[in-house]
Amino acid sequence: MSPYAEALTALDTLYAELPALTCQRKCQRSCGVIIMAKLEWVRITRTLGYTPKGKPSCICPLLKQGRCSVYAIRPTVCRLWGIVGLMRCPWGCTPARWLTEQEGYAWLAMVETVSQQV
């Protein structure tokens, strides 16, 4: 298995450990230009086959007709939305367990560590 494939497997394993959230898919108004780990960016651009460009409106360029076009492989910060206590969903989606702010930062750090292994 290539280092890239191994890193993606590790990334998906981390994602699977996050608390489950039943998403109503109403948060697109909260989607803006974000930062993400290099591995997440490479995965998205390879999957899409092009490099998304930010919009002057600061709306996420990955939203297509109000839906996330990369939902299955969305970056960590998007996955943390609605499950970190300080990032509660304004539409009432609740996770199986709330993460603390410290846990959220720890998840970001773990993903960055995996990303640097490529």
Image (cartoon, rainbow, N blue to C red):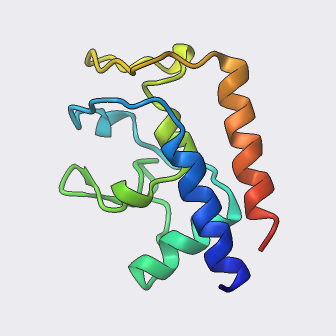
Residue 82 rendering spot, x and y as whole percentages = 42, 25
Residue 70 rendering spot, x and y as whole percentages = 37, 61
Residue 97 versus residue 18 in the image, above or below: above
Residue 32 rendering spot, x and y as whole percentages = 46, 44
Q: Is residue 96 visible?
A: yes
Looking at the image, the residue that sits furthest to the front is 1
In this rendering, position of residue 44 left or right of residue 68: right
Residue 58 rendering spot, x and y as whole percentages = 46, 47
- Residue at 60% of width from left, 74% of height from top? 42
- Residue at 74% of width from left, 33% of height from top? 106
Quarter of the rendering occupied by the N terminus: bottom right
Q: Nearer the viewer, residue 50 or 95?
A: 95
In this rendering, position of residue 11 left or right of residue 92: right
Residue 17 versus residue 97 in the image, above or below: below
Number of marks present in the image shown: 0
Q: Is residue 51 visible?
A: no
